[in-house]
Image (tube, helix red, strand yellow):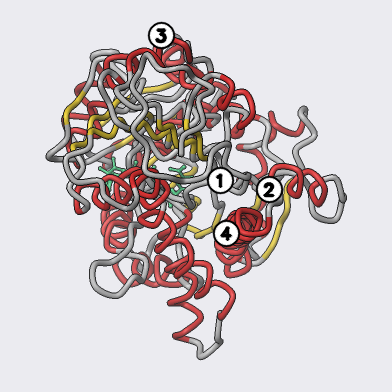
Amino acid sequence: MQIAMIGTGYVGLVSGACIADFGHQVTCVDQDSGKISALNAGEIPIYEPGLDDLVRSNVREGRLSFATVLGAAVKEADAVFIAVGTPSRRGDGHADLSYVYQAAHEIAAALDGYTLIITKSTVPVGTGDEVERIIRELRPDADFAVASNPEFLREGAAIHDFKHPDRIVIGTDDERARKLAGEIYRPLCLNKAPILYVGRRTAELIKYAANAFLATKITFINEIADLCEQVGGDVQDVARGIGLDNRIGPKFLHAGPGFGGSCFPKDVRALIKTAQDYDVPMRILEAVETVNNTRKRAMARKISSAFAGVLRGKAVAVLGLTFKPNTDDMREAPSLPLITALQDMGAKVRVYDPVGMEQARQVLTGVTYCEGAYDCVEDADAAVIVTEWEQLRALDLARVRQLMACPVLVDLRNIYHPEDMKKRGFVYTSVGRAPAHPPVNVHLPRDSDPVLPLL
Ligand SMILES: NC(=O)c1ccc[n+]([C@@H]2O[C@H](COP(=O)([O-])OP(=O)(O)OC[C@H]3O[C@@H](n4cnc5c(N)ncnc54)[C@H](O)[C@@H]3O)[C@@H](O)[C@H]2O)c1
């Protein structure tokens, strides 16, 4: 089949490369000519494990190509995916659908013969109706259908997720469209991926409901973590204790600095807005959003409390900047409000991320960029682990302890063990677990006995 993928960002590029790998002929289109030139030169504009090999092999075998204008690709296509961004609209938090509607206009002009238009972008209920209306108005002669096929891939595991999805959701009432969409994904039936055929509006809602539910799960365990800190519980054990219950499940129960990234924050916001438009209160999600927004900045207090609330002039090393490991995506990363809070308190912030430094430079100012984790912690008064990169899970802790001016380590991902860190001489704080030392005004010279009481 001939496929056009409109939008070659995270979702468009991964989906386009995977669909080409199924054996279809795919053209990925993007209006960003820099991105397309880079791809044509063999460079991958995002960091996603395995994506470079997948793109290169499919380009080499002639199944995947790139273009800046969609005309020729749409004209020849059996199916056209819309995979453009749907960020939060400035000012009101609704999903900004201008890119989707712009793509619909451009697609309409190029349609030739029966074409299935499939919205892969995350879009509010009713967007498919509007895409159909736009195209019908511009091209009353055109033979087309509009379906919804939301994407559930996770950055950092995107290729695996696309090729081994828990389910594929296809939203359309049009029999011909169902058959064609099913045909695109037929290779995945070998992996026994269930295809869920539903109405278009239902498909649109499934995507938001899924993200909103996962965001709620994270926020729930974060609040339980706060309670654990006050009552002396261990949130990891609580998460395990409830996660082993099949009705709950173990995933998305990792307490941390709050959810971020390119999807959850904007999708929670957009679903609340949609519900408001229909006069349906979404009180749980409103609470999720508020709790999560205040949490990221509040994490700075975990660091300042080690210095009796006074961070002015202290050097704080921030390890891990991207919103999660194995991606260079900085969109709504928890590190950003945390760093702003540290700066507001007068701290001198040093930062390091294994992959995200280039993206971070575009959004973070007033910080010192470091070459590596050890460079970052050198002479720091405190270090905070924000993203659980493998590299940060396996730090040489003796070296870290030796390099730091003051051994205050705040682990927002619970990757180290409190008792072990105490033995190694750190003043260690994590999330939802009793601190290994009481939060006190610390000044522990680097050569002092690591087990000295701190008071
Ligand atoms: N990133 C994820 O993990 C993820 C997962 C599931 C769903 N989604 C959803 O998928 C959609 C895309 O997300 P993304 O992260 O890939 O966004 P992105 O910002 O990485 O990519 C969007 C791309 O679309 C291009 N574009 C915009 N208008 C265009 C047009 N008219 N013609 C051609 N190209 C155009 C932009 O230049 C950009 O490269 C969003 O709705 C998002 O919510 C994202």
Residue 200, quarter of picture = bottom right
Sequence order check, earlier mark of 3 and 2 = 3
Sequence order check, earlier mark of 4 and 2 = 4
Q: Which residue is mark 3?
A: 60
The kind of residue on which mark 3 rests is: Arg
Q: Secondary structure at mark 1?
A: loop
Q: Is residue 411 left or right of residue 242?
A: left
Question: x and y percent of residue 221 in the render?
Answer: 64, 55
Is residue 82 visible to us here? no
Marks 3 and 2: which is nearer the front?
2
Sequence order check, earlier mark of 1 and 3 = 3
Whether label 1 lies within 8 Å of ligand 1 gets the answer: no
Sequence order check, earlier mark of 3 and 4 = 3
Q: Which residue is mark 2?
A: 235
Marks 4 and 2: which is nearer the front?
2
Marks 4 and 1: which is nearer the front?
1
Residue 60, quarter of picture = top left
Q: Which residue is mark 1?
A: 431
Sequence order check, earlier mark of 4 and 1 = 4
The kind of residue on which mark 2 rests is: Val
User: How far is the residue under mark 1 from the one under mark 2?
Assistant: 8 Å
Q: Are marks 1 and 2 in contact (CB under 8 Å)?
A: yes
Q: Name the disc covering residue 131, or none.
A: none
Sequence order check, earlier mark of 1 and 2 = 2
Q: Secondary structure at mark 4?
A: helix
Q: Are marks 4 and 1 in contact (CB under 8 Å)?
A: no
Question: x and y percent of residue 27 in the render?
Answer: 37, 31
